[in-house]
Image (cartoon, rainbow, N blue to C red):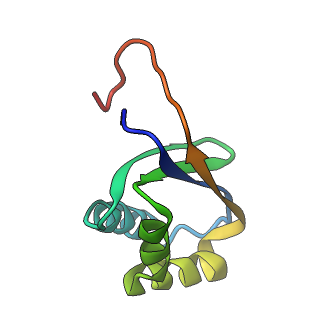
Amino acid sequence: MSFTPYYAVIFTNNRTQEDSGYAEMASRMKELAKQQSGFLGMESVRNEMGITVSYWKDLESIRAWKANAEHQIAQQLGKEKWYAFYRIRICKVEREYSFGTSEED
């Protein structure tokens, strides 16, 4: 991503002990997000806390993703089963720079 500005949605979370269906839903959400208009990319890591950052062209694209019917089901299941805590931050990226190559390049 070298075209600024764009938006980042930062999803931080702590999981519950419940794993049933989580990996399948996470994989589905990743594939579904890639199909959304305005989606630019995603990065994710998990240790004790999980952090997923998705990148979007504009705020309208983020709103459409949040309202996606299948994504809303995943959100509800997350609240009911998979997350003890989560926080979402939406940020405007004004500038970026990097060094070297990443696994995504």
- Quadrant for residue 90, please give it: bottom right
Question: From what the image shows, is residue 55 above or below residue 16?
Answer: above
Question: From what the image shows, is residue 57 above or below residue 77?
Answer: above
In depth, the one of 39 and 12 nearer the eye is 39
The reply to whether residue 17 is in sight is yes
Q: Quadrant of the N terminus?
A: top left
- Quadrant for residue 46, please give it: top right
**Residue under the image location 27 percent in, 27 percent down:** 105
**Residue under the image location 50 percent in, 65 percent down:** 59
Q: Position of residue 72 (x, y in %)?
A: 49, 83
Question: From what the image shows, is residue 5 above or below residue 62?
Answer: above
Q: Position of residue 83 (x, y in %)?
A: 66, 68
Tally of numbered tags: 0
In depth, the one of 104 and 13 nearer the eye is 104
In depth, the one of 12 and 9 nearer the eye is 9
Q: Position of residue 34 (x, y in %)?
A: 29, 60
Left or right of 8: which side holds 61? left
For this orientation, the residue located farthest to the right is 85
- Quadrant for residue 39, please give it: bottom left
Q: Position of residue 29 (x, y in %)?
A: 38, 67
Left or right of 85: which side holds 53? left
**Residue under the image location 45 percent in, 70 percent down:** 60
Question: From what the image shows, is residue 9 above or below residue 102?
Answer: below
In depth, the one of 25 and 36 nearer the eye is 36
The reply to whether residue 53 is in sight is no
